[in-house]
Image: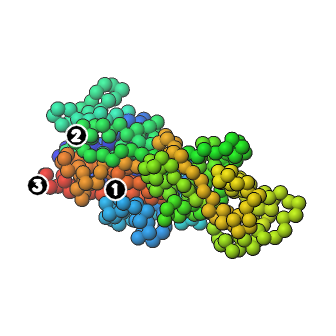
Amino acid sequence: MSSSSAQHVAIIGAGPAGLMAAEVLAAGGAEVTVYDAMPSAGRKFLMAGRGGLNLTHSEPLPDFLARYREAMPHLKAAVEAFPPDSLRAWSDVLGQPTFVGTSGRVFPQAFKASPLLRAWLRRLDAAGVGFAFRHRWIGWDAQGALLFETPDGERAVRADATVLALGGARWPRLGSDGAWADILAAKGIALAPMRPANSGFTVAWSNIFRDRFEGQPLKGVALTIGSHTARGEAVVTRTGIEGGAIYALSADLREAVLGIGQATLTIALRPDLDAAALTTRLSGTRGKQSLANFLRKAAQLSPVGIGLMQEAAIASGRPLPSFSPAELARLINAVPVQLTGVAPIARAISSAGGIRFDELDAHFMLRQLPGVFAAGEMLDWEAPTGGYLLQASFATGMAAGKGALNWLNTTKS
C-alpha cells in the first residue's frame, strides 16, 4: 500500500506491459499511478482476446526465445525471468486457469481477455494502484514534470520514476498511435522506424482469380522465402495474401519487399508428398476430365490451390494443360507468388521498430533519461503471432518495474 513517504511512479500506458510494471512496483511499496489516453484500461488487450486470448506458447523455452530473432539477446533475460510457465501460474492465481491448444498455443479456459483483465484490475486496485484515464502524454515541461492533455486542460505530474508502456503504432483508435516517437526523438533517443509486423502482402492477382477466390483459405500449406519455411494456413485477399503462415514469415517477406520492391513467396500445396509420389499420381489417364477436376481428385488439391497454379502458369507464358505430370508435380509444391508490396500498417496485427535496445540499460532504463524506463511494444522487437507478443510485453513490463524499483531504492539511499 502507498504512504505519504512512498515514492511516486508514473506508468504511462494501461496495457499488459504497463499493468505488469504497476503490479511489480506496487508490491515493492511504490505509490503507482497508471495514466492512459483511453477512457479505460486494456483496450488493445481486450481486442486481442476477442477471438480467443492467446496468452503465450507451450514450446520449449529455447525454441520460444528464437522466435524473437535479432531481438532475442535483448529479451532473453526478461523472458527467462518471467517465462510462459510463470505467466500461466500468474493467470491461474487470478482465477483464470489456462490450457494448451492443439497448436501448442496457451489460452485461458474462459477463452477471452475480459475475465482476466477484470480480475487483474481488482488486484491492482487492492494494491493501491491509481488510474488516471483520458490523460494523453505529450512530453515533459521545462522542470522535468510529465505533461498530459486531459479533458480539463493540460496537467503536469511530478514522478520519482516513470515507466513508458505506450505500445507500438498499430492500433491508433485503441491508444497505440506511436505519437510518443516524436517526443523521444526530440530528446535524442534513437528509434528504429515503425513498420508493419504480422502483416499481409499485396499481390497483383488476375481479375478472374481475385473475383473467384477472395477470402478463400489455403490450408495445410508450406510457405517459403529464402531459407525460411512456415507451415499453416494463408488466406487470399482482394489485394494479396495474409494469414498465420504469412505472419510467421512477415519479417523476412517485408525486408525482401522493402529492399528490392518485390519478393517471391513459394507455396507448397501438398508439402507431405514428394515430387515422385505426386508424379505417379498425376501420370494416370485423365480421360474426359477437365484438368482442374483431375488435379482435385489425383492430388487432392483445393480449387483455390488449382487457381494459384493457373496464375503461375499464365505468368510463365505457358498454359497449365501443357505441363507434363512431372512439371505439374514440381509446380504443386513450388507455386511462385510475386509479392509486390506490404499491406499498410493499419491492417497489420502489430508493428516493428521503436526504441533501439542500445538506448536501454540492462534494467530497461533509457540511458539518456535517468529514471525513465520503457517496456512492451515500444521497443524495437517483433515476433510472430502465437503468444509471443503478449509474453514479451508481460515480461518486459515486469523487468521495467523491477528496474524502476531498483532505481528508486538506489536514489533513496
Q: Earlier in the sequence, mark 3 or mark 2?
A: 2
- Given residues 75 and 232, the one toward you in this image is 232
Q: Residue at x 49, y 62 (%)?
A: 226
206 left or right of 398 in image: right
- Residue 259 is situated, as x and y percent measured from the top left of the image, at 43, 50
- Given residues 175 and 73, the one toward you in this image is 73
Q: Earlier in the sequence, mark 1 or mark 3?
A: 1
Q: Residue at x 58, y 59 (%)?
A: 266
Q: Quadrant of residue 286?
A: bottom right
Q: Identify the colour scheme used.
A: rainbow
Is any part of residue 34 visible from this angle? no
**Which quadrant is home to the C terminus?**
bottom left
Is any part of residue 280 visible from this angle? yes
Amino acid type assigned to the residue bearing label 1 in the image: Thr
Amino acid type assigned to the residue bearing label 3 in the image: Ser
Is 407 above or below relative to 280?
above
Is 387 above or below relative to 58?
above
Q: CA distance from mark 2 to mark 1?
A: 22 Å
Amino acid type assigned to the residue bearing label 2 in the image: Lys
**Mark 2 closeness class: few <14, some 14–19, many ≥20 residues within 10 Å:** few
* Closer to viewer: mark 1 or mark 3: 1
Which residue has dot 2 on it? 187
Which residue has dot 1 on it? 396
Which residue has dot 3 on it? 413
Q: CA distance from mark 3 to mark 2?
A: 28 Å
Q: Quadrant of residue 271?
A: bottom right
